Image (cartoon, helix red, strand yellow):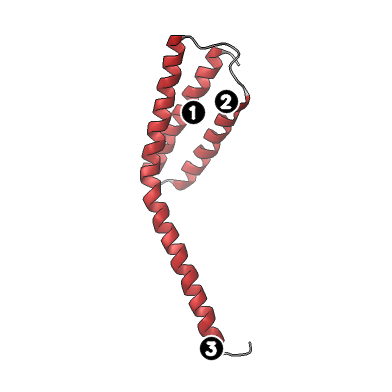
Amino acid sequence: MSTQQTLSLYAAVAEITDQMLVAAQQQDWGKLAVLEAECAARIKRADEDTCNEPLREPEQKIKFAHLKRILDSDREIRNIIDPWMVRLSDILTNNAANRQMFDTYKQLIRPGR
């Protein structure tokens, strides 16, 4: 992969993470999931296709700026998603406990079934 292709790939990932942030802010979980899959595919490609040319200082600065943007968006996405995931986990835990209580109650009412 050339230097330009590498920088373009990092720029594309940065753009996708920006779009992911907007989707998270809008609570558009379906769009977020689609964008996350696209982002993962691009990152996998970056891992598989290494740059054949060493990056010079100006190119390293561009790559660093893209990485900073990616990490900043990722942090903001996590700030939005983490509390939501905790609530979801609580709901699922409560549902499982309620289901277990119901099953136990059902066995008490109808023994032998």
Residue placed under numbered mark 2 in the picture: 46
Task: Residue 56 in the image: state x and y as whole percent.
Answer: 48, 9
Q: Can residue 26 be seen here?
A: no
Q: Which mark is residue 13?
A: 1
Q: Which one is in front, 104 or 14?
A: 104
Instruction: For marks 1 and 2, give the CA distance.
Output: 10 Å
Q: Residue at x 51, y 74 (%)?
A: 99
| Residue sitting at x 46%, y 65% | 93
Name the side, left or right, on which 76 lies relative to 103.
Answer: left
Q: Amino acid at mark 2?
A: Ala
55, above or below 102, in the image: above
Residue with the mark numbered 3: 108
Mark 3 or mark 2, which is nearer the start of the sequence? 2
Q: Is residue 63 left or right of residue 80?
A: right
The kind of residue tagged 1 is Val
Contact, mark 1 vs mark 2 (Cβ under 8 Å)? yes
